[in-house]
Amino acid sequence: EVQLVESGGGLVQPGGSLRLSCAASGFAFSSYWMHWVRQAPGKGLIWVSRINGDGSSTNYADSVKGRFTISRDNAKNTLYLQMTSLRAEDMAVYYCVAGVFDIWGQGTMVTVSS
Amino acid sequence: DIQMTQSPSSLSASVGDRVTITCRASQGIGNDFAWYQQKPGKAPKRLIYAASSLQSGVPSRFSGSGSGTEFTLTISSLQPEDFATYYCLQHNNYPYTFGQGTKLEIK
């Protein structure tokens, strides 16, 4: 079964850091571009970042550039999002997405609050 | 950045109705475009890719058309399970951008 399972979300104070993980199974992970997409409560979908199959190329939304880092470990079939200097506006459900946005995880909630 | 303008933002319709949702891109994106359905508390589900190709397993009452800057999603005969929020996505240029969503509600 093709599956993406996110973890690592939780409550963090403004200015804090968090690392999200996404475990992939059921498909050739290393061949797929991977993305993070977020959705603030009651709001729309926002693309956050993308990484190519071997991890050599990345892109970021301007709102997270310099604060978030996307990476992957193809030996572990896992995607990561390291988030630093978190702000209230980063609070959202973070989805891990594979390929041409055809495979989605269930999401993990990040809450930024003091 | 490419802006995706989706309309309408909300729509009230009845079971059996034909509905159309439109997305306009601020510049040409070829057919690097997709439609998604999202139900409360769930991840989005891809319905249409490459502007007009039906995702495997998606009912044939869903169809997509368009290229360049104008795209439409049509549901030919609404079913109770179709009441949800729909989003469009362009993946032609970074940053990839979604439309603001269309909430389809039961009349």
Image (cartoon, rainbow, N blue to C red):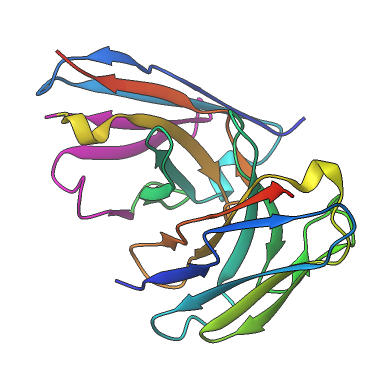
Closer to us: A102 or B38: B38
User: Left or right of A15: which side holds B67?
Assistant: right
Where is residue B34 shown, x and y percent of the image?
Answer: 61, 64
User: Left or right of A45: which side holds B74?
Assistant: right
User: Left or right of A53: which side holds B63?
Assistant: right
The magenta region covers A57-85
Indicate whether residue B1 is drawn in magenta: no
Where is residue B33 shown, x and y percent of the image?
Answer: 57, 70
Q: Residue at x 43, y 53 (%)?
A: A52
Q: Residue at x 59, y 36 (%)?
A: B43
Picture mark count: 0
Quarter holding the N terminus of chain B is bottom left
Q: Residue at x 36, y 31 (%)?
A: A92
Where is residue B60 shown, x and y percent of the image?
Answer: 90, 62
Q: Is residue B76 above or below residue B86?
A: below
User: Left or right of B28: which side holds A60?
Assistant: left
Where is residue A112 shown, x and y percent of the image?
Answer: 23, 21
Quarter assignment of residue B65 = bottom right
Q: Is residue B79 above or below residue A12?
A: below
Q: Is residue B12 above or below residue A113?
A: below
Quarter assignment of residue B20 = bottom right
Quarter assignment of residue A12 = top left
Closer to us: B46 or B11: B11
Q: Residue at x 34, y 23 (%)?
A: A110
Indicate whether residue A79 is drawn in magenta: yes
